[in-house]
Amino acid sequence: MRTYSYKGYDDTGAPKSGHIEALSAKSARDTLAAQKIYVAKIVESRTQRGNFPQPLRGMFYRELAALLRSGMPLVPALGMLLKTPELHTAFVVLSGVRDHVREGLGFAAALEKMSHGTKSFELSAIEVAERTGTLDAVLNQLADVIESHQQLRERVQRAMIYPIFILTLGIVVALVMLGVLLPRMQRITGDFLSMPALTRFMLTISRWLFPWGIVGFGVAGVLGVLFFRQLFRDPARRIQLEVFMLRLPGQRVYRYLLASRFAHTLAILTKAGVPLVEGIALAGRATGNGWCEERAEVAAHAVRHGQNLEEAVHGIPPLAEILTGWIAVGEAGGDLAGMLDHAGRRCDRQFDHHLARLLALLEPLLLLLIGGFVLLITLAVLLPVFSLTDAVLR
């Protein structure tokens, strides 16, 4: 049996769409015709590779692990999850995975064929778990890691709401004052050359900014986006940018984020039975940082030639200071995966702590900068008024 997606019309002419299981496309058409649905387009689900977002993957792994732990075989478990409302948006991906598995393909290989979003470390862990019969346990661990990553992302997004609001409000106020108040004030007070120097300076900015300055900012923004896209396509330049970012003030927050991702990923791969050499490289990719990925490949090569993990991680500068102590204890105590888990959780807490401190500095700094600029514009408006009042009183 295969799953097909269809679009068509019923006998009243109303549009119809949905999914159907059948032995072939012809059989699916015949079944739908018997239901008075006339098919305009029908496509086999497993030919439609789709996106499988991280939050949905976490939910899918958790629910599939629960079904497998209860003793349900993989194919019926996948079929049951297709009926879950929360996973409906991933129906095409999941139905294609089920069809591939039903025809003999491994679960990891089927997931790779159907999903754009699944990470390489997830696929490696699932593949090893299939071979060792620990799929339910590994899926639970994967769900933990994905939920941890998702929570980190949400915390960063929530933390940035207030600074972005303040910045946006300040820009709007400054634009209104530059574009409306200053020009009106000039029409009231008259001669440009007789105005105070601050007012003339602000009027010059206003004339440059409206309208061509805004167009220029828009063009610069588009060019900046194109530049960074091109930059990230060149691995060497991308790594140079990432090295520079790790030298900026506040880079400690980013280091803890990278260390958390590396530790959590390597822990789950180690528990799943993935060889350490392969696990280091996959954990490097999971950080999302090209420099860490490159150095992790070098560290994996060193471990392959007999170096221990602690010494190898010393060669990954963003992680060396944070993780090597935990790794040394884990190797000495024979519980590397457990210590990596502890390290990942500690990095999560340190990330939250340093992010809070950074934002505590950023918010008043933004207020100071925006308030200072608005004060300058206000003075630029008021100084000519004060001069005009003095002239009248004399």
Image: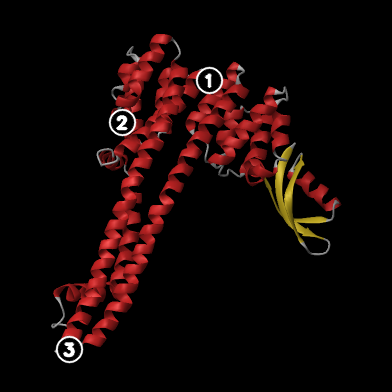
44, above or below 166, in the image: above
**Residue 307 visible, this angle:** yes
In the rendered image, which residue does mark 3 sit on? 393
In the rendered image, which residue does mark 1 sit on? 272
| Residue kind at label 2, given as amino acid type | Pro
Q: Which mark is residue 318?
A: 2
Identify the secondary structure beneath mark 1: helix
Q: Position of residue 161 (x, y in %)?
A: 43, 52
50, above or below 336, in the image: below
Q: Position of residue 96 (x, y in %)?
A: 65, 38
| Residue kind at label 1, given as amino acid type | Ala
What colouring does the structure picture have? secondary structure
The answer to the question of whether label 2 and label 1 lie on touching residues, with beta carbons closer than 8 A, is: no
228, above or below 102, in the image: below
Labels 3 and 1: the sequence-earlier one? 1
Q: Position of residue 292 (x, y in %)?
A: 34, 32
